[in-house]
Every structure is written in C-alpha cells, then in structure tokens.
Image (cartoon, coloured by chain):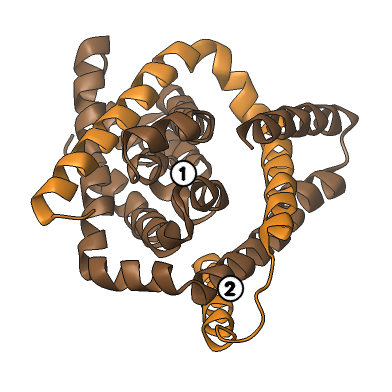
Amino acid sequence: MIKYIILTLIAGIVAGYIGNITGSTLVINFVSEHLFDAFLILLLFVMGLSFGLDKDAVAKLKKTGVKVLVIPIATALGSILAGLIGGLILGVNTIASMAVSAGYGWYTLTGPLIGELFGPYWGALGFTVNFFRELITIIIMPLAVKLDKHAPVASGGATTMDTTLPIIVRYCGTDMLITSFSSGFILTLTAPFTIIAIASLR
Amino acid sequence: MSNLINLIIPLIAGILLGYFLRNKKRVKLDKVIFWAIIALIFSLGFSIGSNSKLLNSLPTVGLTAIIISVMTILFSVFFVKIAKKVVKIE
C-alpha cells in the first residue's frame, strides 16, 4: 500500500510542478482543491459506512469513550515541547520555533500565519516544518503503527482529520476512524489560537 | 470553518447508514477506498508540486525544518504513549 501511496505522491508532485510551469490556474485549482475535496468527502462517507457496519469498531470506541481526548492534548504538548527543545538545540528563537511546531502539520495555515507574526524566514519554516510533518507521517506509517497503534495519529497531528486519515484507517484499523478524526479536528481548531498565544509570549 | 462542517456531514451520514445497514448485506468497500486514497494522494501531491512558495523555501530552510519536524513527531508519539498509560487506553 505505502509503495503505491509514495509513487502516487511523487507522480502528483511532478504533475503539479509541470502544471504550475505551463501555468493554468484553473487546472491547478481544480486538481488541488475541488478534486481533493471531492475524494476526501467520498472517503469520509465510505469510511464512515464501514465503521458503522463494523460492530467491533463501535464497541471498541464505546469502551475508550471520552478518554480519546487525551490523544490530541498529548500531541499538542509534545509538539510544543519539541519546538522549544528543537529551538534550543538549533540556537534559534525558541518562541518562534514553538509557534511553528504548534501548526501540528497544517502547513497551509501555519506558513502564512507565522509569516505574518514572525516575518518571512519563519513563515518559510512554518510552511516546511508542517509540510514535512505530513510527509514523514505518511512515509513512516507502516513502521509507526508497529511501535504503537496510536503513533500515526500522534505523528499526524492536525492532518489526521483529512489528508492522513484514510491511510491511518487503512493501517491502524476501522476502529481508529473516530479517534483519528477527532484528534485532527481538535488540533485543527486549536492550532491558530495556540500559535497566536505562543507569539504573544514575546 | 465551513470546511470542517463539510467533512463532518459525510462522515456522520456514512456512519448512520452503515449502522442501519448492519444486518443487511455485507458490502465490499476496500477497492473503493483504495482508489479514492490514490486519487486523494495524487491531488495532494499536485497541490505540493504546484505550490511554488513551498518549493522555493525548501533550499533555505529545509534542514532546519526536517529537524524540528522530526522532533515534533517523536515528542508527540512519546507523549501519547505516556498519556495512554496514564488513562489506560488499549
């Protein structure tokens, strides 16, 4: 599975790069936004369907209950601490590196927002740090799931409600659908507020 | 925010339909899911490849970005592992 995903991702990147040079914004918007949204909505519906059909998955979720909320909280704390320690190791502005890490993988938000708050250098980092988080999450998924069933959800951060969700469900099982979606959902909601709150520490 | 609602509606619709169809026929959805993932990943790649802002910033900040990024992943996984032990999630 991961082989096909990585090959498709590379093919998509190459196609997107060529598409950008030949320069039809209409085509680019169509493929990267409308097509993306259409397949994501289809996937959410179909994955919801297989979750609803699966008695064991529903039972497992009921057993865990509201405890699933500790996963996004732990992910958020881990990410921000990683930003702090990473900033100290690299000898850069630790407030900015924490803010960048609080994007939880949501690069389309974090890039522009951090750029606004900390200037273009950190804006570029906001983009790339979170882009790599999504990319690495996808690539290491077969390994991460062996380490811990919830590791891909922790790794994926805010992306576990959309881009990485179907791959997580594929690797971790149908019962992870709600756990993954809710974690990504909560982190997506909190990312902008956390970034602005960290920036205000300056 | 409307985007979040756009995602929740199909998810809940799917779950409810699955729940009511539970004792009916078994449906094979694996193939559909596989091809939809492939299409999704292709368009994700496409949006990365066509994002010149992202690609242009890679050479200058790439290494720093990879270091911070790997650390956020490691710390998140580690914290989730601890949290799971504390609240006893399987």
In x, y percent, where is residue A7? 72, 28
Q: Which mark is residue A106?
A: 1
Residue A192, placed above or below residue A81: below
Q: Chain of mark 2?
A: A
Q: SS class of the residue under badge 2?
A: helix
The answer to whether the residues at label 1 and label 2 have Cβ atoms under 8 Å apart is no
Q: Please check whether the numbered discs 1 and 2 fall on a single chain.
A: yes
- In the foreground, A52 or A193: A52
In x, y percent, where is residue A22? 90, 30
Chain B image colour? orange
Front disc: 1 or 2: 2
- In the foreground, A173 or A16: A173
Alpha carbon separation for disc pair 1 and 2: 27 Å
| Residue to which mark 2 is pinned | A49
In x, y percent, where is residue A182? 37, 62
What residue lies at 44% left-to-right and 34% top-to-bottom? A115
- In the foreground, A134 or A98: A134
Residue A69, placed above or below residue A147: below
Residue A127, placed above or below residue A24: above
Q: Please name the amino acid that badge 1 sits on.
A: Trp
**Quarter of the figure with residue A61:** bottom left
Query: In the visual, does A110 lie left or right of A69?
Result: right
Q: Which chain is in brown here?
A: A
Q: Please name the amino acid that badge 2 sits on.
A: Leu
Q: Chain of mark 1?
A: A
Query: In the visual, does A35 lie left or right of A160?
Result: right
